[in-house]
Image: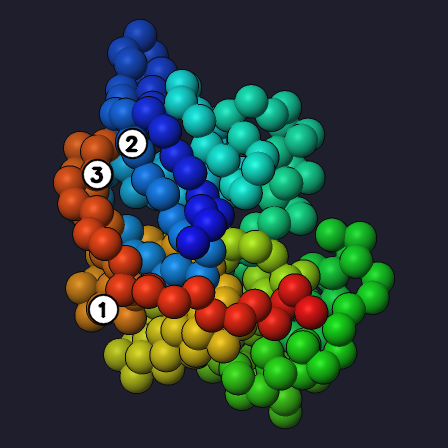
Amino acid sequence: MQNIVTINSLTKIYRIGKVDVPALRGVDLQIKRGEFIAIMGPSGCGKSTLLHIMGGLLGPTSGDVLIEDKNLARCSDRERTEIRRAKIGFVFQRFNLFSTISARDNLQLARQIRGNGSFDTHTVEEILGVLGLQDKMDHKPLELSGGEQQRVALARALINRPALILADEPTGNLDTVNSQIVLSMLRDLNLRFNQTVVMITHNSEAASYAHRIVEMRDGQILRQPRSELLVEPEDIFSH
């Protein structure tokens, strides 16, 4: 099964005053297409730094980060931006929706930023159906519950059919019921659309929705068990 993410000997050192603070210390990680993995660890262990480098938001100090066939570590800032727009969708703890426009317009804006003027209407409607958003698209974010806002954020991340979804504590601002709803929908999107998902979480119950849990501590990966994903599902986005 093909790797969608390949990370080799990745390091990240932050300079704080005259002191070097290592955030990542030689991380190796491979993620298969269609996997749903959870990265867990205590605060300050480097998991968010790893996610941000994987998403092209930060550059590494050394090492390689391949998203499909593109090595982010060897790209310019402009090239990383283009890869991020073309291949990666983000879901954050804060929903980061534009509050003055409707959910529909938030999705439209995401398509415009990518420069994607046309899309597969059937696929988009299916995504909205999975997320239970068909009747919510004309509401502004503040007219929606926290769980509904996070579902709009998920739809926005998926609207351009990225190769990879990066979710940073996606249920951190939700209560237990809405957390379970969003996690179930994220797992359903992974299963139905072969959508690769990498999720940062400190919550073991949230991590249980993933195929594989990667544990981090002190900038290193402690445990990387074999994925439960044994058969690569059909990717409807390729049709």
Q: Farthest right residue?
A: 117
Quadrant the C terminus occupies: bottom right
Q: Mark 2 points at which residue?
A: 27
Quick check: 62 left or right of 85? left
Q: Which amino acid does label 2 sit on?
A: Val
> What is the secondary structure assignment of the residue under circle 3?
strand
CA separation in Å, label 1 and label 2: 23 Å
CA separation in Å, label 3 and label 2: 6 Å
Q: Do the residues labelled 3 and 2 touch (CB within 8 Å)?
A: yes
Query: Is 160 placed above or below 80 here?
Result: below
The residue shown at (43%, 78%) is 188
Q: Which mark is residue 208?
A: 1
> What is the secondary structure assignment of the residue under circle 1?
loop
Q: Which amino acid does label 1 sit on?
A: Ser
On the image, the x and y values in percent for residue 57 come to: 52, 37
Q: Nearer the viewer, residue 73 or 141?
A: 73
Circle 2 residues within 10 Å: few <14, some 14–19, many ≥20 = many
Query: Is 64 placed above or below 234 here?
Result: above
